[in-house]
């Protein structure tokens, strides 16, 4: 069984009976992306952030380059959580595709399903996903990081750290760019999508087809910001997630 202490990070003590919100970070990111979320969520929702290998306190572990292997290991890690309390998934960018793939893996294994899937800044799985620069030179990925935002400017000055960040980003983008899974059965859970009004990478029109991934309800929300939301948009998104989890019976 996978060690949940490596895979999952909690930034507050969970309340008894709380619904887990499993949070999956963006490509090149880590669990600390969600460090402030406990301050914005009620005690009835327990944010649990996934920490993928190859970063932060899992820096020495090999990075994934294939979605299937990543999801297989994540299923093993998440199984004990599914037996404890209700779960919903939130995925940002790459995390959205991982969450969607994880939900399908649980369905295929007849395991407990998440009550809802929340996705942000991610092109719908049915669309052709051509990620620029994932198999090109490092310089191209550095430009990609600068253009996408979300990376503190001072990190570009530390060449050693930058090299490790590029390697992690390349591995994550390889996971996405080589993933060609086409499920034969739709999900049957609510999906709620969040698009940045200024996001050229994952605009609203390319997130709209997320609605075709489920037989359940679908809502697309457009918020201020680009691929990475500012604090006000994050707060607004979390408020919508809380409302959605309550409608889904998770609060």
Image (cartoon, rainbow, N blue to C red):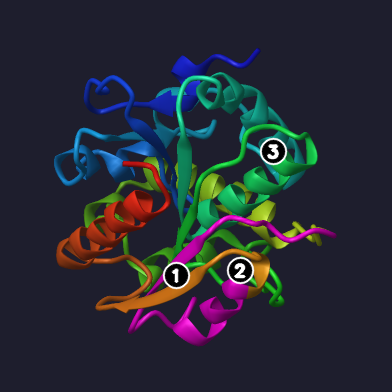
Quickly name the residue at label 3.
106
Dot 2 falls on a residue whose secondary structure is loop
Asked if residue 158 is positioned above or below residue 187 in the image, the reply reads above
Residue shown at the point (51%, 23%) measured from the top left: 81
Q: Label 3 to label 1, Cα distance in Å?
A: 36 Å
* Image position of 140 (left or right of 103): left
Quickly name the residue at label 2.
133
The quadrant in which the C terminus is found is: top left
Q: Residues within 10 Å of mark 2 (few under 14, many from 20)?
A: some
Is mark 3 in CB contact (under 8 Å) with mark 1?
Answer: no
Q: Position of residue 193 (x, y in %)?
A: 45, 68
- Residue 209 on the magenta span: yes
Asked if residue 49 is positioned above or below residue 127 in the image, the reply reads above
Mark found first going from the N terminus, 1 or 2: 2
Mark found first going from the N terminus, 2 or 3: 3
Q: Label 2 to label 3, Cα distance in Å?
A: 31 Å
Q: Nearer the viewer, residue 136 or 67?
A: 67
Dot 3 falls on a residue whose secondary structure is helix
Is mark 1 in CB contact (under 8 Å) with mark 2?
Answer: yes
The quadrant in which the N terminus is found is: top right
Q: Label 1 to label 2, Cα distance in Å?
A: 9 Å
Q: Position of residue 236 (x, y in %)?
A: 21, 64
Asked if residue 203 is positioned above or below residue 81 in the image, the reply reads below
Asked if residue 151 is positioned above or below residue 204 in the image, the reply reads above
Dot 1 falls on a residue whose secondary structure is helix
Quickly name the residue at label 1.
143
Of tags 3 and 1, the one toward the viewer is 3
Q: Nearer the viewer, residue 178 or 183?
A: 183
Residue farthest to the right, as pictured: 184
Residue shown at the point (63%, 33%) measured from the top left: 112
Q: Nearer the viewer, residue 61 or 201?
A: 201
What span is in magenta? Answer: 184-211
């Amino acid at each position: 069984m996978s060690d949940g202490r490596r895979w999952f990070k909690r930034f507050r003590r969970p309340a008894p009976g709380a619904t887990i919100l499993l949070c999956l970070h963006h490509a090149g990111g880590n669990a600390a992306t969600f460090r402030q979320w406990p301050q914005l969520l009620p005690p009835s929702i327990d944010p649990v952030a996934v920490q993928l290998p190859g970063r932060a306190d899992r820096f020495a572990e090999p990075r994934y380059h294939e979605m299937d292997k990543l999801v297989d290991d994540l299923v093993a890690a998440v199984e004990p959580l599914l037996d404890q309390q209700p779960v919903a998934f939130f995925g940002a960018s790459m995390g959205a595709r991982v969450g969607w793939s994880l939900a399908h893996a649980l369905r295929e294994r007849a395991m407990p399903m998440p009550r809802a899937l929340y996705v942000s800044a991610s092109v719908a799985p049915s669309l052709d996903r051509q990620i620029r620069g994932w198999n090109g030179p490092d310089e191209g990925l550095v430009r990609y990081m600068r253009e996408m935002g979300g990376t503190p400017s001072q990190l570009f000055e530390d060449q050693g750290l930058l090299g490790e960040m590029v390697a992690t980003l390349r591995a994550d983008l390889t996971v996405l760019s080589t993933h060609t899974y086409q499920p034969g059965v739709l999900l049957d859970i609510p999906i709620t999508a969040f698009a940045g009004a200024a996001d050229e990478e994952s605009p609203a029109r390319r997130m709209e087809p997320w609605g075709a991934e489920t037989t359940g309800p679908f809502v697309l929300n457009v918020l201020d910001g680009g691929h990475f939301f500012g604090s006000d948009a994050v707060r607004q998104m979390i408020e919508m997630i809380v409302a959605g989890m309550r409608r889904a019976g998770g609060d």
